[in-house]
Amino acid sequence: MVLSPDYQLCIDVGYTFSRFGVSCGGSFVDIERVRTIDTRALCGNVPEARKEEWIRWLAELVRAKRNLWPSITRCGLCFPGLVSAHGDIGRTNAIWGDGASDLAAPALSARLGLRVDVLNDLTAAAIRHGEDSCFTDQRTVLTLSVGSGIGSKIYDRVERRVVMEGSGRNGEIGLAVVDEGPEALRNANGLLPGILGNYASGVGFARLLRHNAAIASGGQAYKASLLWSTLAKGGAAIDTIDDVRLNEVAVACIQAGDVFVCKILQRSIKYLAQALHVVVLFDAPDVILLTGGFAIAVGEVYRRELCTALSRYLPLLYSSDEINHMVKLAAADDLESLRGVAVWLERLRLPKNEPIQ
């Protein structure tokens, strides 16, 4: 089937960075990466004000892209939070907090001035990876993203779809409670004590580093660490440096074998395995594909530690070799969700069951 040469705007909204791409026939002709607006810094903890500020920011960027590319006819947007089968963004998410109501796709379309189709960011990444020809011999691919946030989605290659229920709750493992103790870490809003995202996401890892550097039992080890000396050399302090920069320094320390940071990484991954092994027991994926900025930056060390932790939780059903074969590290690709949006938009334009070229 010959498709009209129209342009489509693809948007990947991230907690830290967002990406905007203009695609034609599934290929990008323009890509831009920008820092996501910090709505909390602008509006405090007022969710509806934060939501409005985010929409205004997004509308300005979309308007600028459409001025550059007047032939844009449609927009696909992936979002880090619950997205329903109808494309409605759940009221509670890390971008604006605990809002009063969902953001319906038609309402967002009206604000942006063109049709917007919305899906979850992990759903987009799962489509991109699930369609990869390197998984020809596998049926189910679980994409596990450890970036600023954390989550997973399973792609069924036979059905050519992400396994999803109507409200989009599948794979939101970042909300699984893994610590019920009185000192359980909370999110940036002081809520949701003990959830996995507070320990194993990129933001959670930075929080865990700060927590362990501050407590009595960890303070001395921290001051003897490479992390402490590196930050001190740069005139930075662990309690004031932003999460992105802290994790960049921490990753370098992991690669150098810093005992303090490596122990925190092992603890973070243990919490992840605690939640992930249940997913494996229920869904038995053929592949667990590790992706996301933090996991990719740590690299093979992260994959090995996750295999070791999973082996402790799955001793009877999976051998260490099977787990090692199942868990794979994705190639560094800052555009995986953006590419997934482009594939998805092309699929929406095709008659049902016609293959994407």
Image (cartoon, rainbow, N blue to C red):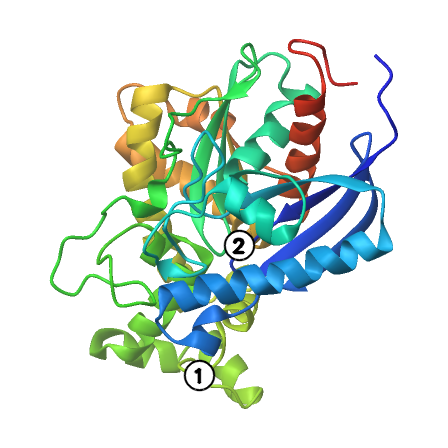
Question: Which residue lies under the disc numbered 1?
Answer: 240
**Residue 335, horizontal then vertical, whole percent:** 68, 45
- Establish if 326 lies above or below 199: above
The numbered dot on residue 294 is 2
- How many C-alpha atoms fall within 10 Å of the one at disc 1: few (<14), some, or many (≥20)? few
Q: Quadrant of residue 78?
A: top right
Instruction: Judge from the rendering whether residue 277 lies leftward or rightward of residue 26; answer left or right.
Output: left
**Residue 265, horizontal then vertical, whole percent:** 40, 57
> Is there a contact, CB below 8 Å, between mark 1 and mark 2?
no
Instruction: Judge from the rendering whether residue 309 lies leftward or rightward of residue 234; answer left or right.
Output: left
Q: Is residue 16 something one can see in this rendering?
A: no
- Establish if 79 lies above or below 346: below
- Determine the residue positioned at 68% across, 22% down: 347
- Determine the residue positioned at 54% across, 11% down: 159
- Determine the residue positioned at 85% across, 48% down: 70
Which quadrant: the C terminus?
top right
Q: Is residue 139 something one can see in this rendering?
A: yes
**Residue 175, horizontal then vertical, whole percent:** 30, 46
- Establish if 183 lies above or below 224: above
Q: Amino acid at mark 2?
A: Phe
Q: Amino acid at mark 1?
A: Thr
Name the residue nearer the viewer: 26 or 278.
26
Disc 1 is placed on an element classified as loop
Work out whether mark 1 precedes mark 2 in sequence or the reverse, and give the earlier one.
1
CA–CA distance between discs 1 and 2?
20 Å
The numbered dot on residue 221 is none
